[in-house]
Image: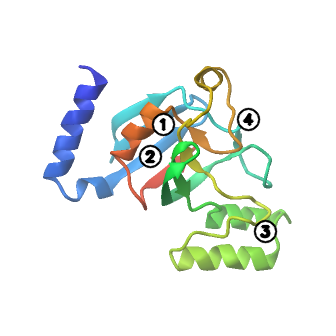
Amino acid sequence: MPARFLIIIFILLLSLSAHAKDDIWVLIDTQKLVLEVKLADITLVKFSNISIGRNGSGFKRKRGDDITPKGTYKIAWINRKSQYHLFFGFNYPSRENAQQALEKGLLDKKSYAKIIKAHKNNQVPPQNTPLGGLIGIHGLGRGDKKIHKMINWTHGCIALTDEQINNLYTLIKKNTTVIVE
């Protein structure tokens, strides 16, 4: 069955169930370079050939290290007019990212407290701490499709083609859980 047909069937099923979209989450496998949209344990859509940070994935130690941070995040905002076509911003740094950074001496107590307070208040954490910010999922925009297919090129985000990000846009929303592993 063609993927587009399955997506259409899925969207129709979503329209029948008002709460189904609330149960959708995203799994990003940074080793296989695959993004999956899931409903419980069922994979609804799989996007292959995604790109991550130039320096791979792991613990993001500082702004500009080009590492895609691993962890559990929520979509905190959506920029429909991004230079990368669409941008789904994460609530990065997470509480766990901040705790690890504090323990490693990479984050001061004041910055840590601001991040924790933002999470407690359901707000976007500060994006200008030493850990960096503006991490999320985006399209290519004016980016080069050939480079996207050949190498990991982002500064820490997850990149899809514009077609893939448009399809993702129909499936997820603000507060969708994203697990990056």
The earlier-in-sequence mark between 3 and 4 is 4
Judge by depth and name the residue closer to the eye, 59 or 126: 126
> Mark 3, mark 2: which one is toward the viewer?
2
Q: Which amino acid does label 4 sit on?
A: Arg
Q: What element carries label 4?
A: loop
Residue 92 picture location, percent across and down? 62, 60
Q: In which quarter of the image is residue 53?
A: top right
Residue 35's disc number:
1
Residue ID at (65%, 20%): 150
Read off the residue under disc 3: 102
Read off the residue under disc 4: 54
Callout 4: 10 Å neighbours few (<14), some, many (20+)? some
Q: In which quarter of the image is residue 107?
A: bottom right
Q: Pointers 1 and 2 in contact (CB under 8 A)?
A: yes
Q: What element carries label 2?
A: strand
Real-space CA distance between mark 2 and mark 4, rounded to the nearest whole angstrom: 21 Å
Real-space CA distance between mark 1 and mark 4, rounded to the nearest whole angstrom: 17 Å
Callout 2: 10 Å neighbours few (<14), some, many (20+)? many
The earlier-in-sequence mark between 2 and 4 is 2
Residue ID at (70%, 66%): 98
